[in-house]
Amino acid sequence: MASAYIFVGTYFHAFFENYYPVLIIIFVITAIWFVYQWLKKMKSEKQL
């Protein structure tokens, strides 16, 4: 997922410059979601 953010930010920087607040919100939501999924996986493996 991080590579997608880097790719988009590198090649389309000028286009997304006007949408920084929205992109930051999307980034925070996806980062929280990925951490939640990772923690859920780690917790389920620990119980086995």
Image (spheres, rainbow, N blue to C red):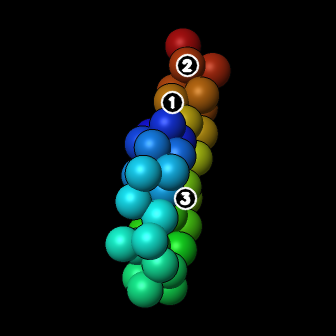
Q: Which residue is mark 3?
A: 32
Whether pointer 1 and pointer 2 mark residues with C-beta atoms closer than 8 Å, the reply is: yes
Q: CA distance from mark 1 to mark 2?
A: 6 Å
What amino acid type is highlighted by mark number 1? Lys
What residue lies at 43% left-to-right and 86% top-to-bottom? Answer: 18
Residue 24 pos. (x, y %): 53, 74
Residue 7 pos. (x, y %): 45, 43
Q: Quadrant of the C terminus?
A: top right
39 vs 23: above or below = above
Q: Which residue is mark 1?
A: 41
Q: How many numbered discs sit on the rendered protein?
A: 3
What amino acid type is highlighted by mark number 3? Ile
Residue 39 appears left or right of 37: right
Could you tell me if residue 43 is visible in this image? yes
Sequence-wise, which precedes: disc 3 or disc 2?
3
31 vs 27: above or below = above
What residue lies at 42% left-to-right and 51% top-to-bottom? Answer: 11
41 vs 12: above or below = above
Q: Which mark is residue 45?
A: 2
Q: Nearer the viewer, residue 40 or 21?
A: 21
Look at discs 3 and 2 and give the one toward the viewer.
Answer: 3
Q: Which mark is residue 10?
A: none
Disc 1 crowd, CA 10 A, few/some/many (<14, 14-19, 20+): few
